[in-house]
Amino acid sequence: MTELSDRIRLIDALRGLSILLMVVHHALYDAAAFLGAPWWLFSNVVFDYLHLVFAGTFIMLAGVSSRFSRSNVKRGLKTLVCAAVVTAVSWQVSLPIWFGILHLMAFCMLFYGLLRRWLDRVPHWAWVALWATSLYVLDVAPILPGLDIASADWFPPLPWMFIFLLGTSVGAAIRDRKFPQWFYTFDVPVLPVIGRYTLWIYMLHQPVLYGIAQFIRAVAR
């Protein structure tokens, strides 16, 4: 793949699947929080695990895409503006998101964009080791020990930034066509199209879901 415009549809499809699963997860939250559905629909052993899997996939794919971006700094600033909008809107409805997945990706894009020259020298196994070590030491804790932040969506840089940086390393191998040929030709319907508009879907899905939940709540009274 020599041109930035040459998209790998499998990557778009995986991104599309991840955002759809995220929408379902948030829909179940709204059902439990506003419509009286049992909380186990939203939080249970299976969904809690899957939530980490598809969120991690989403973050890693953002790292992969960083290898094909013309400017990760501009991309990061754009994402940061969107994250600020999410914080403002979520604060208005008393469910503030101070450092959610969008904030994390903005941080990672800027971090990678500014330090790419040095970060590209780190082998992929080092990011895996740092991720595993940070999980063990921090146990998915807040950014600083003892820092208590109530956030409706919480994705601190540690350990999640290492998943993003692992994605940048994987992205280099993809860019250099080190993956099997089927990876570059595999195609499925619909999902790749959804995967191209994940930022818009992320920005719009919660207001839409919240509006639907409030409409159902009003009609059911």
Image: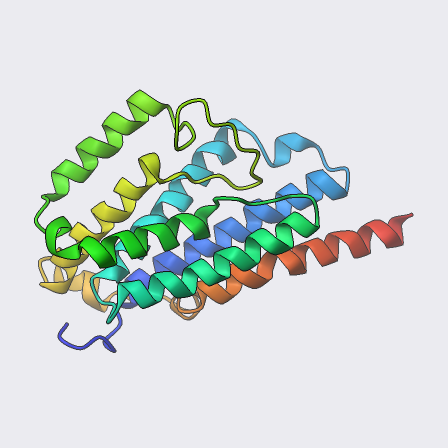
Query: Measuring 40% from the left and 69% from the top, which residue is drawn there?
Result: 196
Q: Number of numbered discs present?
A: 0
Q: In the displayed structure, does residue 79 sit left or right of residue 61?
A: right
Q: Position of residue 77 (x, y in %)?
A: 38, 63
Q: In the displayed structure, does residue 77 sit left or right of residue 3?
A: right
Colour mapping: rainbow
Q: In the rendered view, would you say 206 is above or below 97?
A: below
Quadrant in the picture for the N terminus: bottom left
Query: Measuring 61% from the left and 44% from the top, which residue is drawn there?
Result: 96
Query: Measuring 44% from the left and 48% from the top, which residue is drawn there?
Result: 101
Q: In the rendered view, would you say 24 is above or below 140?
A: below
| Residue 108 in sight | yes
Q: Position of residue 135 (x, y in %)?
A: 31, 27
| Residue 58 in sight | no
Kindly give the residue lying farthest to the right in the view shown.
221
Q: In the rendered view, would you say 156 is above or below 218?
A: above
Residue nearer the viewer, 112 or 133? 112
Query: Measuring 65% from the left and 58% from the top, which residue is drawn there?
Result: 207
Q: Position of residue 111 (x, y in %)?
A: 27, 52
Residue nearer the viewer, 73 or 102? 73
Q: In the displayed structure, does residue 64 sit left or right of residue 100?
A: left
Question: Hey, which quadrant is residue 3 in on the image?
Answer: bottom left
Q: Position of residue 184 (x, y in %)?
A: 20, 66
